[in-house]
């Protein structure tokens, strides 16, 4: 027997509870976005990619800390370095590629289903503006990209404190990390998500959008390099994946991180990079509002 | 105070000189009317502007010109008024990967309901989906999807409910139950605006009609009053009698009758005045010794009214 012939409860009971604020409504969209990207409430196969990428991001940190803790146990503290093999700035460099993949997956997964399932009408008919919806969606992306960048850094930080044998001394001795790491994560978010969101506002398939974004990120590197060589050095700004590396190299004062990129090669100031990223973010925001005003 | 049937005395939704155009195409043109508690049927052929009007009322499309107020509030200035509004869109508009309960609960959160689980339980119960609420929507039939959409629209206890083709895909039993549900909601004093192509169902639901043709208000009021307003189109009446030809010949001698036709021993007459015909028939039948078994107007139905509105015949 199916439920098709069920008896309806015609005594509809009115909801007499309290109503929440618009801020709470926005947060419910943020929570939905976080769940969506992580594949929560979805079938197991939808969890493989996001959680696999998270595992890949944190694995080197776990191995690094674990290896040194293990070595200290085996050979004694005097025989092992009391600092980590991978520095915080190096770790950003190691995870650039995998963070790119995470953004390539997360932004389309966040934006595309609402369009293709026609669910934007549900948002549009609720006490929300287009800006509310977009801010909440981008907020979910911000939370996850920040967490994705910060989680392995946190593992390194805690591991470093354990290895040093003096947690307080480790913290006081590395106070700069408390601003460098979060600002580095913000630089990654700001430089990588604008284009991903624009693509996700058009393309109908998540995989296709992710592919376009990855291809665009990769192809702009040689194109920017060639244009900068042939014409103005400012064309180096077009190298999308290079901005985060340049900014992190300056934040950590470690030129090696971005030494091979078109931005560093063409002596582009990090402030020019910041202005470029900000302009791209403003343009993406304006574009998304215009696009979603038509859709919602 | 206006007495036009396009307006109600206690409006919850009002539109004034409302227009919407997309490029060169005018979807809604200078529409002025109001809606109040009870069920109002929104009728019109494809492209009449019904869905555009509903989308404007639901905040999904901005008007090009004119004013609209929902519960005395301009929704463009205060979107919080949508806490008291529900929409069942014509499109599927569901996340297929969520369960029915998750979808309805999320709708409650989006509407600012503080206890979404409790509200979802009530709304799911109201549409008889308790048993299937734990299953993913991707496994639902079209009728079940329709009901979960109705639950999603009811979950915030709306004072105003917009229903765009709400019975699509529902089986006959579900249709009856949903219509009963809509009646019970209307009896509680809520405003329901129902757009549907299935005129027989609108007839069962709505006590008032707003008809649109080419984006304009074509008619408003109850169907029989709208029909009566077509003074240039005669009423068609079916008369079952034992000797239809004899009665038909006699009727032709009276000015109240415009034409007479006998098809399969059934007499069909056209008259300008149903009242005059009603007074004439018993007398004539008695004088001619004709036995009448049934007299029934054939074009008082909503379908006939709609046909006259759209095609003028």
Image (tube, coloured by chain):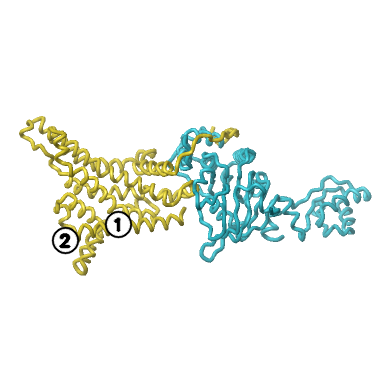
Chain colours: A yellow, B cyan
Q: Using residue A218 as the reference point, say whether residue A69 is left or right of it.
A: left
Dots 1 and 2 on the same chain: yes
- Between disc 1 and disc 2, the foreground one is 1
Q: Secondary structure at mark 2?
A: helix
For the point 57% across and 56% down, the residue is: B67
Give A138 or B123, whichever is nearer the viewer: A138
Crowd class of label 2 (few under 14; some 14 to 19; many from 20; radius 10 Å): some
Crowd class of label 1 (few under 14; some 14 to 19; many from 20; radius 10 Å): some
Q: Position of residue B269 (x, y in %)?
A: 81, 55
Q: Position of residue B179 (x, y in %)?
A: 62, 41
Q: Quadrant of residue B48?
A: bottom right
| Distance of label 1 from label 2 (alpha carbons) | 22 Å
Give B112 or B139, whichever is nearer the viewer: B112
Give B50 or B61, whichever is nearer the viewer: B61
> Chain for mark 2?
A
Question: Which corner quadrant holds the N terminus of chain A?
Answer: top right
Q: Which residue is mark 1?
A: A278
> Which circle marks residue B148 in the picture?
none
The correct choice, above or below, for A185 with respect to A239 in the image is: above
Q: Position of residue B100 (x, y in %)?
A: 48, 38
> Chain for mark 1?
A
In the rendered image, the residue lying farthest to the bottom is A231
For the point 55% across and 60% down, the residue is: B65
Q: Using residue B70 as the reference point, say whether residue B96 is left or right of it.
A: left
Q: Which residue is mark 2?
A: A265
Q: Using residue A228 as the reference point, say whether residue A128 is left or right of it.
A: right
* Label total for image: 2
Give A250 or B307, whichever is nearer the viewer: A250
The answer, for residue B261, to whether it is visible in the render is no
Q: Secondary structure at mark 1?
A: helix
Q: Which is nearer the N-term, disc 1 or disc 2?
A: 2
Whether pointer 1 and pointer 2 mark residues with C-beta atoms closer than 8 Å, the reply is no
């Amino acid at each position: 027997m199916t439920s098709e012939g069920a008896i309806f409860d015609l005594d509809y009971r009115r909801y007499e509870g309290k109503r929440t604020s618009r801020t709470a409504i926005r947060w419910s969209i943020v929570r939905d976005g976080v769940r969506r990207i992580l594949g929560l409430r979805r079938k197991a196969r939808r969890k493989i990619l996001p959680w696999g990428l998270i595992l890949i991001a944190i694995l080197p940190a776990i191995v690094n800390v674990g290896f040194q803790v293990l070595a200290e146990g085996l050979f004694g503290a005097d025989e092992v370095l009391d600092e980590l093999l991978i520095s915080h700035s190096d770790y950003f460099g190691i995870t650039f590629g995998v963070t790119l993949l995470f953004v390539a997956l997360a932004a389309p997964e966040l934006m595309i289903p609402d369009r293709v399932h026609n669910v934007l009408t549900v948002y549009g008919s609720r006490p929300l503006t287009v800006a509310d919806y977009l801010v909440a969606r981008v907020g979910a992306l911000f939370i996850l990209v920040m967490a994705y960048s910060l989680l392995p850094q946190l593992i390194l930080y805690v591991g470093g404190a354990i290895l040093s044998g003096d947690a307080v001394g480790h913290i006081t001795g590395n106070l700069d990390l408390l601003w460098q790491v979060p600002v580095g994560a913000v630089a990654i978010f700001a430089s990588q998500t604008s284009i991903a969101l624009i693509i996700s506002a058009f393309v109908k398939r998540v995989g296709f959008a992710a592919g376009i974004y990855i291809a665009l990120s990769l192809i702009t590197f040689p194109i920017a390099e060639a244009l900068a060589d042939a014409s103005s050095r400012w064309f180096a700004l077009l190298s999308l994946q290079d901005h985060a590396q340049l900014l992190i190299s300056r934040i950590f004062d470690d030129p090696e991180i971005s030494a091979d990129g078109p931005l560093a090669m063409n002596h582009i100031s990090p402030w020019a990079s910041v202005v470029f990223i900000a302009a791209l973010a403003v343009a993406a925001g304006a574009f998304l509002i215009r696009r979603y005003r038509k859709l919602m | 105070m206006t007495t036009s049937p396009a307006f109600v005395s206690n409006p919850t939704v009002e539109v004034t000189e409302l227009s919407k155009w997309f490029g060169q195409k005018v979807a809604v043109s200078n529409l002025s009317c109001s809606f109040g508690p009870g069920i109002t049927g929104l009728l019109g052929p494809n492209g009449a502007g019904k869905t555009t009007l509903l989308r404007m009322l639901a905040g999904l499309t901005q008007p090009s010109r004119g004013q609209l107020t929902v519960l005395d509030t301009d929704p463009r200035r205060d979107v919080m008024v949508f806490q008291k509004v529900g929409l069942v869109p014509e499109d599927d508009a569901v996340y297929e990967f969520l369960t029915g309960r998750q979808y309805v609960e999320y709708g409650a959160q989006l509407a600012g309901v503080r206890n979404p689980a409790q509200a979802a339980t009530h709304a799911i119960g109201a549409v008889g989906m308790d048993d299937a609420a734990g299953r993913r929507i991707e496994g639902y039939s079209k009728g079940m999807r329709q009901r979960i959409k109705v639950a999603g629209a009811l979950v915030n206890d709306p004072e105003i409910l917009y229903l765009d083709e709400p019975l699509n895909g529902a089986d006959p039993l579900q249709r009856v139950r949903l219509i009963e549900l809509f009646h019970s909601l209307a009896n509680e004093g809520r405003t329901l605006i129902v757009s549907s192509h299935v005129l027989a169902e609108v007839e069962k639901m709505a006590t008032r009609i707003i008809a649109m043709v080419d984006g304009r208000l074509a008619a408003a009021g109850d169907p029989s009053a709208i029909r009566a307003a077509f003074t240039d189109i005669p009423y068609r009446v079916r008369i079952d009698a034992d000797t239809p030809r004899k009665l038909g010949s006699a009727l032709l001698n009276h000015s109240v009758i415009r034409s007479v036709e006998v098809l399969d021993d059934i007499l069909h007459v056209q008259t300008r005045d149903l009242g005059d015909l009603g007074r004439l028939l018993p007398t004539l039948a008695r004088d001619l010794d004709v036995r009448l078994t049934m007299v029934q107007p054939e074009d008082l139905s909503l379908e006939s009214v709609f046909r006259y509105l759209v095609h003028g015949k």
